[in-house]
Amino acid sequence: MKRSLLILAAVFALSLNSCRETTEEKTEEAVEAIGEDIENAAKEADERIEEGAKKVEEKVKEEVDEEIHETDDVNGEEAGDIQ
């Protein structure tokens, strides 16, 4: 009877250890997936920021060019026409 209880206790202990390893592996996989999601989101945000910065840069260049050449449109009239 003692031997049966010892064997049963050993099997139970091993099963707990096995479950712990499985849980640990699943946790590691989940953490890696979260890390990849964060990395992908950061890359996407970076790309969007770059696109926005390029649009702003183009707009600023247009505005500066208009000011330099006095072709800035103010209320439907060119800047050079306003007195």
Image (tube, helix red, strand yellow):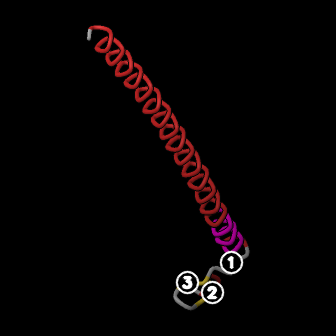
Q: Which mark is residue 74?
A: 3
C-alpha gap between disc 1 and disc 3: 11 Å
Snapshot quadrant of residue 74: bottom right
Residue stretch in magenta = 57-66
Q: Mark 1–mark 3 contact, CB under 8 Å? A: no
Could you tell me residue 68's position as x and y percent?
Answer: 71, 70
Compared with residue 52, is residue 30 higher up or lower down, i.e. above or below? above
Which of marks 2 and 1 precedes in the sequence? 1
Snapshot quadrant of residue 2: top left
Q: Mark 1–mark 2 contact, CB under 8 Å? A: yes
In terms of depth relative to the viewer, which is nearer, 74 or 9? 9
Tell me the amino acid under the disc marked 3: Val
Helix, strand or loop for the magenta stretch, by majority: helix
Tell me the amino acid under the disc marked 1: Glu
Q: Quadrant of the C terminus?
A: bottom right
Q: Mark 2–mark 3 contact, CB under 8 Å? A: yes
Q: Secondary structure at mark 3?
A: strand
Any magenta on residue 58? yes
Residue placed at 68% from the left, 72% from the top?
62
In terms of depth relative to the viewer, which is nearer, 26 or 9? 9
Q: Quadrant of the N terminus?
A: top left
Q: Which mark is residue 70?
A: 1
In terms of depth relative to the viewer, which is nearer, 38 or 54? 38
Tell me the amino acid under the disc marked 2: Glu
C-alpha gap between disc 1 and disc 2: 7 Å
The residue that disc 2 covers is 78
Residue placed at 65% from the left, 83% from the top?
80
C-alpha gap between disc 2 and disc 3: 6 Å
Any magenta on residue 53? no
Q: Secondary structure at mark 1?
A: loop
